[in-house]
Image (tube, helix red, strand yellow):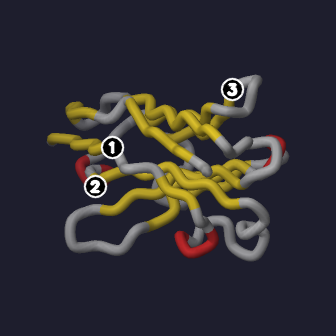
Amino acid sequence: QVDLVESGGGSVQAGGSLRLSCSSSGSSASTNFMGWFRQAAGKEREGVAVIYPGGRGTKYADSVKGRFTISEDYAKTTVMLQMGSLKPEDTATYYCASSYGGGWLDPMRADSYNYWGQGTQVTVSS
């Protein structure tokens, strides 16, 4: 059983920052791809940032490069997403996801992941 619980969403003005956290049980960032995805109203879910198993690399969507940073704690049970220079177009529900072995082909695809959190809302106002 894998449980992922996101926290840290909220409302912020454009240019502001937020930090999301994903606490995982039954899943370890040592062995799993851990990713952050987002889904805006009326749009498909898209990959935002992922961290490779064991912290061996990261990947970001072009739209967030230089503004967002994904990281993990030492115990590899919590994955964070530090978001800066937020824009209104970053408004979405953000989801944490975990995949054991499924991310090697394309870690930014939602269907590479089999475990999902419930999502946390991020709203950026102009």
Q: Tell me if mark 3 has few (under 14), some (14-19) or many (20+) residues whose alpha carbon lies within 10 angstroms of its own.
A: few
Residue found 51% across the figure and 62% down from its top:
47
Query: Label 3 is placed on what type of residue?
Result: Asp
Quote the CA–CA distance across marks 1 and 3. Answer: 20 Å
Secondary structure of the residue carrying numbered label 3: loop
Specify which label sits upstream in the sequence, 1 or 3. Answer: 3
Residue found 65% across the figure and 50% down from its top:
34
**Residue marked by disc 1:** 120
Answer with left or right where residue 50 lies relative to residue 101.
left
Given residues 44 and 125, the one toward you in this image is 44
Q: Quadrant of residue 54?
A: top right
Secondary structure of the residue carrying numbered label 1: strand
Q: Which mark is residue 89?
A: 2
Query: Label 1 is placed on what type of residue?
Result: Thr
Q: Position of residue 24 (x, y in %)?
A: 59, 38
Residue found 72% across the figure and 69% down from its top:
102
Q: Are marks 1 and 2 in contact (CB under 8 Å)?
A: no
